[in-house]
Image (cartoon, rainbow, N blue to C red):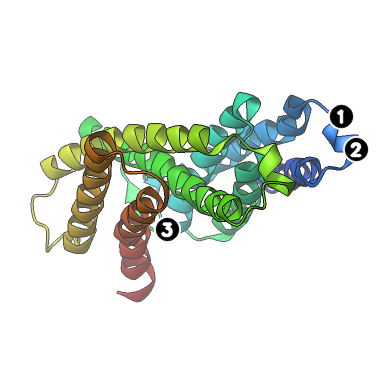
Amino acid sequence: MNAITGLIAFVLYLVSTLGLFMRLKGDNYFSQKPVSTLLFPGFAAVILHGFVLYEHMTSDNGFQFGFFDAASSVAIVISLLVLLMSIKRRTEILAVVILPITAVTLLTQSLSQPSYMLPYDAPEGLKIHVLVSIIAYSILGLAACMSIVLSLQNRLLHNHHPGGWLKKIPPLQVMEKLLFDLITSGFIGLTIALASGFIFLEDLLAQHLVHKTVLSIIAWLVFANLLIGRFTLGWRGRTAIRWTLIGFASLMLAYFGSKFVLEFIV
């Protein structure tokens, strides 16, 4: 049953991606469709993906939370966020990129073997830390994707190529505001995640958390610097994009780099 549900979710992700891509391309049939109609398969895929994810992660000993489970969890949250944004914000181009990636994480997670377990009787604070970390990482991951689109948008505008898919997305100023709204929300979540995480770091070396902690703090400092620069110096454009990608790269190494090393190398 899980395999069938996962397969249906996989197909629905691709159906939504195809419809949105054709709309961006200017196809008459898909351009006439309400965007909500094209987003609907994506929402259905997220719901089914959630069922598959829950079933795969639950076991007799606790929640399985290995590398591929974490990737699938982050991807499904990012997909839900971008689908909700696309209803009114014309951010379908982000969905075209993110939905197929989420479909791949669903596939890899379904084929993965149990690894790290989070016991059911784990402290509530630890469960909150894990949940907030996933949400914060997802929001900042979406911000990183948006910064890449902003970079392309900025380059095309500077090269005087305002046509094509640029007409299908919000103006540059609106995209920048969305970017910093996401960064601010993600930064708050990251702050809470770090603060709650320190409660459980009794022995950094024994828990192999040194690199994860240091890189997460570096990411926090990068995003803090970016927000300070934004509100005091008016940072935008390439500066904002550069700092966003640096911060997310550090966070990606902290979260997935550490998990990959611990589960597949050490």
Question: Is 104 left or right of 15, judged from the image as shown?
Answer: left
Instruction: Decide: is 232 above or below 108.
Output: above
Residue for point 75% across, 43% down: 24
The residue that disc 1 covers is: 32
Tell me the residue that label 3 is attached to: 67
Residue 59 screen position, x and y as percent = 45, 44
Q: Quadrant of residue 256?
A: bottom left
Q: Nearer the viewer, residue 91 or 157?
A: 157
Kindly indicate whether the residue at mark 2 contacts the one at mark 1 (C-beta within 8 angstroms).
Answer: yes
Which residue has dot 2 on it?
Answer: 28
Report if the CB atoms under discs 1 and 3 are less than 8 Å apart.
no
Viewer-nearest of discs 1 and 3? 1
Residue sticking out furthest to the bottom: 265
Q: Secondary structure at mark 1?
A: loop
- What type is the residue that disc 2 sits on? Asn
Q: Position of residue 152 (x, y in %)?
A: 56, 54
Residue 179 in the image, given as x and y percentages of width and height: 44, 38
